[in-house]
Amino acid sequence: MTFPNPFRPGAGHPPPYLAGRTTEIREFERLLAQPVILTNLVLTGLRGVGKTVLLESALKPLARQRGWLWTGNELSETINISEEKLAQRLITDLSVLTSQFEVDRQVIEGIGFHPQRQERSITFDHALMETLYKSTPGLVSDKIKAVLEATWEVVRHSGVKGIVLAYDEAQNLADRSEKDQYPLSLLLDMFQSIQRKGLPIMLVLTGLPTLFPKLVEARTFAERMFKVITLHKLDQDDRRAAIQRPISDNKCPVSFTVPAVDEIAYRSGGYPYFIQFICYEMFEAYLGHGDGVPNPGITVAHIARKLDSDFFSGRWNKVTDRQRELLSIIASLDDADDEFTVQEISEVSKRIGGKPFSPSHVNQMLGALSEQGLIFKNRHGKYSFAVPMLADFIRRQATDNP
Ligand SMILES: Nc1ncnc2c1ncn2[C@@H]1O[C@H](COP(=O)(O)OP(=O)(O)O)[C@@H](O)[C@H]1O
Ligand SMILES: [Mg+2]
């Protein structure tokens, strides 16, 4: 017998059941209720914790239900974005909204813009937006502000509450002084300016924990401009719901035993991606595969091993021996799962014997590991692992290959 596997281990794949996150959703609801937008949203957390799906499956529908328009994109391919490219991104995303609205040509003329076309009603589409952008004098910021103001002018007559502009993987935005390109500062300046004028256009940025420090570094006022919501691992009840609801909601012919649920909840560490992964594999082992022969010999522990080879090994194999030594020292710290300092690492390295790491050496190596996406530096100058449960994996390596 085969039965469709309900679990969805994959970046941005909506889960069969979105567990928990009620507090976070309520926070966003409060932001939507602001009479004037003073606070925007930064949604942050480690990879796989569920930022993208919360944005897409919960926050977007909520905003729409409350009368907001929603547009945006993912910034993953835009590491080297320029101010001009950012402006083009915004124009493209805004025009998706405005091309749904036919407006009286008076409205367009009211924005101080005289399109060549003669029709009475016009859609403020991509081409028209582009023309407005090009014909507005000044800097990129002046031009894009003109486009945003015009966009609001065009949609406000239809009774919408406002517009949400949502950008995922926003940690990829960066100012680059050597190229004289400041897209991140541009984005922040622009929103501050239009919100001060009372335009209800809200900015929602999603990204890794490096995102918010980056924003504050670009513009100190970013500190006051955003509510930061950090997604964490799921608590015990939510873990159980994430594991069991997809089974019960879909009336699956099999279900996990109570010990299996507990074991999955434990092995996953409460990280949504790991829950989906383990559940998916367990389900496949029993029901999903083509030959229809269940394999009850597979245990959660087997699957957790598969997670090691599929998820962690690739990252581990890319680091040098010396980096592994350093990572193993970090994983042995009491605060490995939380945050740690250069000093702590260096001291422990002296205590355990072997070749010690000086603070400056640690510093330099953490820099390299950050580039590789394994570690990140938080706002207080401390470091954390950038991959969930990496410390556990490293400790397992040490036990397996002493
Ligand atoms: N609240 C949740 N309950 C159950 N599964 C979730 C939840 N949040 C995320 N997931 C699952 O976890 C995985 C990673 O989610 P994703 O949104 O891509 O993470 P991120 O954007 O933070 O890297 C996906 O397979 C998704 O279906
Ligand atoms: Mg994501």
Image (cartoon, rainbow, N blue to C red):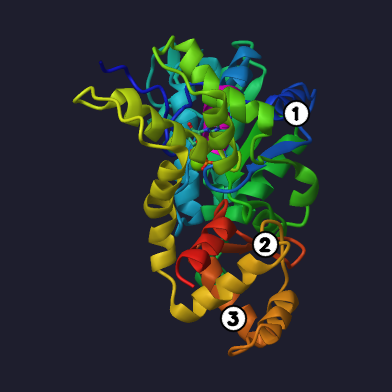
Q: Give the CA distance from mark 2 to mark 1.
A: 30 Å
Q: Residue furthest front?
A: 297
Counting residues from the start of the chain, the first of labels 2 and 1 encountered is 1
Residue where numbered disc 1 is placed: 27
Image quarter hosting the N terminus: top left
Residue where numbered disc 2 is placed: 336
Q: Residue at x 39, y 67 (%)?
A: 317
Amino acid type of the residue tagged 2 in the rendering? Ala
Q: Measuring from the top left, give residue 61's x and y in whole percent.
A: 57, 18
Please name which of the two marks, 2 or 3, marks the residue nearer to the observer. Answer: 2
Counting residues from the start of the chain, the first of labels 1 and 3 encountered is 1
Give residue 294's quadrant in the image: top left
Q: Is residue 262 visible?
A: yes
Q: Is mark 2 within 8 Å of ligand 1?
A: no
Residue 54 drawn in magenta: yes
| Disc sitting over residue 364 in the figure | 3
Crowd class of label 1 (few under 14; some 14 to 19; many from 20; radius 10 Å): some
User: Relative to residue 346, is residue 247 depicted above or below?
Assistant: above
- At numbered mark 1, what does the secondary structure look like: helix, strand or loop? helix
Q: Measuring from the top left, give residue 340's x and y in whole percent.
A: 72, 66
Counting residues from the start of the chain, the first of labels 2 and 3 encountered is 2
Give the magenta part as a residue range: 50-58
Q: Residue furthest left?
A: 291
Amino acid type of the residue tagged 3 in the rendering? Gln
- At numbered mark 3, what does the secondary structure look like: helix, strand or loop? helix
Q: Give the CA distance from mark 1 to mark 3.
A: 38 Å
* Circles 2, 1 touching at the beta carbon (< 8 Å): no
Q: Is mark 3 within 8 Å of ligand 1?
A: no
Is the magenta region chiefly helix, strand or loop?
helix
Give residue 174's quadrant in the image: bottom right
